[in-house]
Image: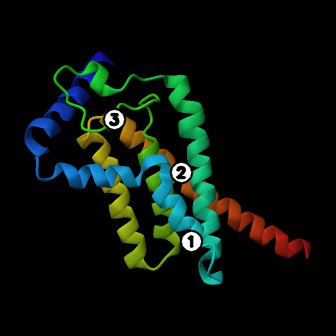
Amino acid sequence: MNFLLQLEGNILLFIQEHIRQDWMTPFWIFITSLGNKGWFWLAVSALMLIPRRTRKIGIMALLALSIGFLITNLALKNLVARIRPYETVEGLKLLIARQSDFSFPSGHACASFAAASVYFRKLPQKWGISAVVLAALIAFSRLYVGVHYPTDVLAGAVIGIWAAWAAIHLVEYIERNSYRSS
């Protein structure tokens, strides 16, 4: 386990030393802010509730966001209680405000991949792919700004993808069974 932590710390220091650039930092801080409390994904999904043709997609995405939040923010973060990398990786410079919760898994990555995975499965390809690209950018931004280890982001993304799968299947199951009973 110590080897993994050291490897992850080295990855973050590599990003800091070789990828971070002063001219890019405002972009990455903006990208990471899109994931704050899932606001961007919540807003897009809520807007999808308005037109009838996207209503079911909005419901699926909001359900996926909720499932991901319950697993990530309410359960795993507190169970695992992983300290943020800027607290433990010597030389790592934090680019945004200190975070008030634990590190594992990444809530930003979870929310982003939960909503984006629903969009990818249910919207036209250009919107689905765009959503996944944005989700990946938000996930990477958490490493760039120094608030997550790579495994935090990877776990958040996997949980988000699973939450999307669960939400899609749950909505489709309810829809199938409501037609049978009417």
Identified at 49% across, 55% down, the residue is: 39
Residue type beneath disc 1: Leu
Which of 158 and 139 lies nearest the eye of the viewer? 139
Q: In which quarter of the image is the N terminus?
A: top left
Tag 1 and tag 3, C-beta contact below 8 Å: no
- The colour scheme used to paint the residues is rainbow
Q: Is residue 82 left or right of residue 44?
A: left
Q: In this view, does 120 lie to the left or right of 67?
A: left
Residue type beneath disc 2: Trp
**Is residue 157 in sight in this rendering?**
no
Write down the quadrant of residue 131 in the picture: bottom left
Mark 1 sits on what residue? 47
Mark 3 sits on what residue? 97
Q: What element carries label 3?
A: loop
Which one is earlier in the sequence, the residue at label 1 or at label 3?
1
Identified at 53% across, 51% down, the residue is: 162
Q: Which of marks 2 and 1 is in front?
A: 1
In the image, residue 73 sits, relative to residue 178, either above or below, namely: above
The residues bearing labels 2 and 3 have C-alpha atoms spaced at a distance of: 29 Å
Q: What element carries label 2?
A: helix
Residue type beneath disc 3: Ala
Tag 2 and tag 1, C-beta contact below 8 Å: no
Mark 1: few, some, or many residues within 10 Å (few <14, many ≥20)? few
Tag 2 and tag 3, C-beta contact below 8 Å: no
The residues bearing labels 2 and 1 have C-alpha atoms spaced at a distance of: 23 Å
| Image spot of residue 69 (x, y percent) | 57, 44
